[in-house]
Every structure is written in structure tokens, then in C-alpha cells.
């Protein structure tokens, strides 16, 4: 009996061990097939982010109307959007652009989805945008019969929310495409979801019925400034545009002086410069011009930094990201405190002792230049919207134009100081701080 029981037990173990091994073998085969099969859940590349609003993109191969193509799949939140039309983008050339490059491959022009509609109060009209999750297709002209190819999708433009626009961007989205598996690629057609692919370029604003209205919130990002620049670009020649842009940069610099954290300190700065020259009045003009030179120097340094970042990384300097950086905020706060202590004569910006005698003491020309530089730094928290608008436009232009515009913005900010130091009596005409300054800031 015991022997029979052992035999039955051994048979039971063999039977179920075999079943278990067969199950494990099947599972192993499934895993191997899954690994060997083409998968195109490519890693997302972040394109833009503003707080909780963000948008990313990935590349996957598809069969568009039966032919090989790349799909650049955008995944984003419901407020951050891209501009669909060059005519309604905040500035020329900032509409969403998608292309691709790969060794041995050529691509047709991008096929965009039907845009949504966003009302932009800054331009006082409805504009066409892309938002949320959507796909842009790039037909492949000469697909190979097989093999793996490294491709790069190039995405450029500007992203905005209903409250702010970010700096222009140029992003690369990489992918590896296995053409031997082309028969398994996801199929898409021109009438996918009824409106997935726009068969023709989007019509001009106002010529087609509006689709879904995405947002009616105010766009405080670039405001009237870039809207005016866009109108000028449609009516002026290229050289004429540059002149108008430079004049607008000067006006933007002048307007910085009316901001709430700048206007109240103008009389303090001017009177300090004047008080330093009571014994030698002839030095007043020199010290005033040195102070103005410091302001221009700050904007020149800012322009140089922006150009270096763009050349070195291909990215644009984003003031919004800078102000969200805790280290940058702390450094800016400490510089503002230092500037306040200098204005109250608690600290003195002095030269090395070897040069102090040549400058007539620590409060000489170099000290005035340093004060002007700090004044430029002090202006950035209040002038973020204006400076950001100029910066967004400037980074879409050649480096020489960009640097010139930002320097002229510094000249515009410095001009009132030059006038007031030359004729201190004009200080009585400087507007007194009040609630009107907040209204001006919001309008800017």
C-alpha cells in the first residue's frame, strides 16, 4: 500500500511539474516575442512647461493612407498651446513648425491637424492654436526595404498659456525606426476621427467657421507690444522693420522707469549723484553719464548672455524659469538689498586703493557705473513682462539685431537719468507713486 502510494505521488509530481514547466516555457516565449516585437512607446521629450501646464512629444512610425510616415505625437495639458498660423502668432516665425531629418531619408512637408480657436485679447482677435494631445505627420518619401534608422524630429515655435508666453524653443525629438517591421505600424487615414488631418493649409482667420473655443482668458504674455510689432511686419520692409523695432525697444526701456519698483527710487538715485558733486559741480554730468553707462552695461551683458546660451545650447533664455529658480531669486534679493544699502550710504562702492586717488575717492566714476549696473538688476523683477516681450522677439532675430535691441532698451531706461542729473530741477515733474502705477504695470 505504501509503495502504491509513493508511485501515485511520484506520478502526480511528474504530471504537474511538467504542466508547470510548460507554463513557464510558454510565459518565457511570450516575453521573448514581446521583447523582439517592435514597440514604439518612445520616451517623451518635454517641449514646454509653465507650472502645471506642460507639453511633450514623441516620434513613432505609422502608415499614413497606406504609406510610411512619422507621427510626432504631442501630449499636453489643456491650457498650454502652440500657434497654428504665421499670420496670428505673437511674432513672425513663431508658429509651430515640425520637420525631420535622418541619414538616407527624405520627408514631405508636415501635415498638421485641424487647429482649435483661442481668443487673444492682446491681438483682439481669434487665433488658431494646437493644444492637448494631437499628432503631426511627416510622410517618408524614399523608405528603405528594411533596417533600422535613427531619426530626429525637429520642433520649433512658441508655447503660451492663457496668462503667459514662454521663450521661443527649438527641440529635437529622437527615435529609432525599424523599417523591417513596417507592416506592423499603426495605420492612420486622412479622415481619422473625422478631423484628424487637415487636407489643406489652415485658412486665414475669419474665412472659416470657428471650431472649438479653447480659452477666452486674457493673454498677458506679449500684449500690445508684440501685436504692434506683428502689424508693422506686415506693412514695412525688412530694413524699415528693424528701425521700428529699435524705436519700440527704446520706448520699452523708457516704460521700465514707470514700474512700481523703479519710479520711487529715481529721485533717490539722482539726488545721491547730485550730492556727490556739491564740491565739484562740473563732475555731475560725468557721474550721471557713468551711472547711465552702468545701466546700458547691464543690458549689454544680458544680451550677451542670451546670445551665448542660444549659440551654445540652441535654447532661449527664459525669464519665467529664471524667476522660479530659488538660487536666482535669493541672489537677486541680496543684490537688491546691497543696492538699497548703497543708496542709504550704509555701504560705499569703492575702488581699489591704487585707483582711488585717480578717481577722487571711492564714490567716483567706477562706483557710479556699478550703481547703474545694480539699477538695471533692480529693474528686472518689475520689468519682467516688458523685458520678456522684447527678449521673446529678439531671440527670433539675428544675433546683431537681438543684441542691438536689448542695448537700446538699456539706453531707453538710462535716458531719464541723464536728463534729470543734468537738470535736477526737473525732479519736481517726476510723477508721484500711486495706484496708477499698478494699472500701468498690468497694462504692460
Image (spheres, rainbow, N blue to C red):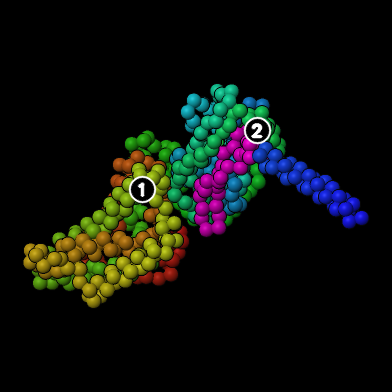
**Disc 1 target residue:** 309
Tell me: residue 341, above or below residue 154.
below
Cα separation, mark 2 vs mark 1, equals 39 Å
**Residue 320 image offset from top left, x and y in percent:** 44, 57
Which residues fall within the magenta stretch?
34-63
Q: Mark number for residue 181?
A: none
What residue lies at 44% left-to-right and 49% top-to-bottom? 167
Reading the chain from its start, which is encountered first: label 2 or label 1?
A: 2
Residue 168 seen in the current view: yes
User: Element under label 2?
Assistant: loop
What residue lies at 26% left-to-right and 58% top-to-bottom? 295
Q: Is residue 225 left or right of residue 349?
A: right
What residue lies at 38% left-to-right and 54% top-to-bottom? 387
Residue at the outermost left position: 357
Q: Nearer the viewer, residue 137 or 312?
A: 312
**Residue 377 image offset from top left, x and y in percent:** 32, 61
**Disc 2 target residue:** 185
Amino acid at each position: 500500500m505504501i509503495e502504491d502510494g509513493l508511485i501515485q505521488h511520484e506520478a502526480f509530481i511528474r504530471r504537474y511539474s511538467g504542466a508547470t514547466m510548460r507554463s513557464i516555457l510558454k510565459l518565457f516565449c511570450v516575453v521573448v516575442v514581446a521583447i523582439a516585437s517592435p514597440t514604439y512607446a518612445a520616451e517623451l521629450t518635454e517641449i514646454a512647461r509653465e507650472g502645471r501646464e506642460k507639453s511633450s512629444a514623441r516620434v513613432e512610425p505609422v502608415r499614413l493612407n497606406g504609406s510610411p510616415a512619422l507621427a510626432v505625437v504631442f501630449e499636453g495639458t489643456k491650457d498650454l498651446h502652440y500657434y497654428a498660423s504665421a499670420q496670428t502668432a505673437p511674432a513672425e516665425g513663431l508658429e509651430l513648425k515640425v520637420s525631420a531629418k535622418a541619414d538616407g531619408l527624405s520627408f514631405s512637408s508636415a501635415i498638421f491637424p485641424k487647429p482649435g480657436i483661442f481668443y487673444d485679447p492682446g491681438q483682439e482677435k481669434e487665433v488658431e492654436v494646437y493644444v492637448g494631445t494631437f499628432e503631426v505627420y511627416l510622410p517618408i518619401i524614399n523608405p528603405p526595404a528594411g533596417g533600422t534608422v535613427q531619426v530626429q524630429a525637429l520642433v520649433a515655435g512658441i508655447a503660451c498659456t492663457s496668462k503667459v508666453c514662454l521663450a521661443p524653443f527649438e527641440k529635437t525629438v529622437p527615435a529609432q525606426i525599424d523599417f523591417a517591421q513596417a507592416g506592423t505600424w499603426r495605420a492612420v487615414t486622412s479622415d481619422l476621427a473625422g478631423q484628424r488631418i487637415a487636407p489643406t493649409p489652415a485658412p486665414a482667420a475669419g474665412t472659416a467657421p470657428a471650431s472649438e473655443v479653447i480659452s477666452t482668458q486674457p493673454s498677458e504674455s506679449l500684449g500690445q507690444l508684440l501685436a504692434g510689432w506683428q502689424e508693422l511686419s506686415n506693412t514695412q520692409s525688412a530694413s524699415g522693420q528693424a528701425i521700428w523695432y529699435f524705436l519700440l525697444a527704446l520706448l520699452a526701456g523708457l516704460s521700465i522707469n514707470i514700474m512700481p519698483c523703479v519710479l520711487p527710487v529715481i529721485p533717490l538715485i539722482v539726488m545721491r549723484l547730485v550730492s556727490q558733486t556739491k564740491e565739484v559741480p562740473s563732475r555731475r554730468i560725468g557721474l550721471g553719464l557713468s551711472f547711465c553707462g552702468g545701466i546700458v552695461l547691464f543690458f549689454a551683458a544680458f544680451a550677451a548672455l542670451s546670445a551665448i546660451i542660444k549659440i551654445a545650447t540652441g535654447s532661449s533664455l527664459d525669464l519665467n524659469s529664471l524667476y522660479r529658480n530659488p538660487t536666482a531669486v535669493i541672489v537677486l534679493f541680496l543684490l537688491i538689498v546691497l543696492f538699497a544699502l548703497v543708496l542709504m550710504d550704509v555701504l560705499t562702492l569703492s575702488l581699489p586703493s591704487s585707483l582711488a586717488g585717480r578717481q577722487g575717492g571711492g564714490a567716483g566714476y567706477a562706483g557710479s557705473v556699478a550703481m547703474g549696473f545694480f539699477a538695471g538688476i533692480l529693474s528686472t523683477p518689475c520689468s519682467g513682462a516688458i523685458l520678456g516681450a522684447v527678449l521673446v522677439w529678439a531671440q527670433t532675430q539675428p544675433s546683431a539685431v537681438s543684441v542691438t535691441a536689448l542695448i537700446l532698451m538699456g539706453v531707453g531706461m538710462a535716458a531719464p537719468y541723464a536728463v534729470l542729473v543734468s537738470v535736477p530741477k526737473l525732479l519736481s515733474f517726476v510723477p508721484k507713486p500711486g495706484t496708477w502705477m499698478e494699472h500701468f504695470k498690468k497694462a504692460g
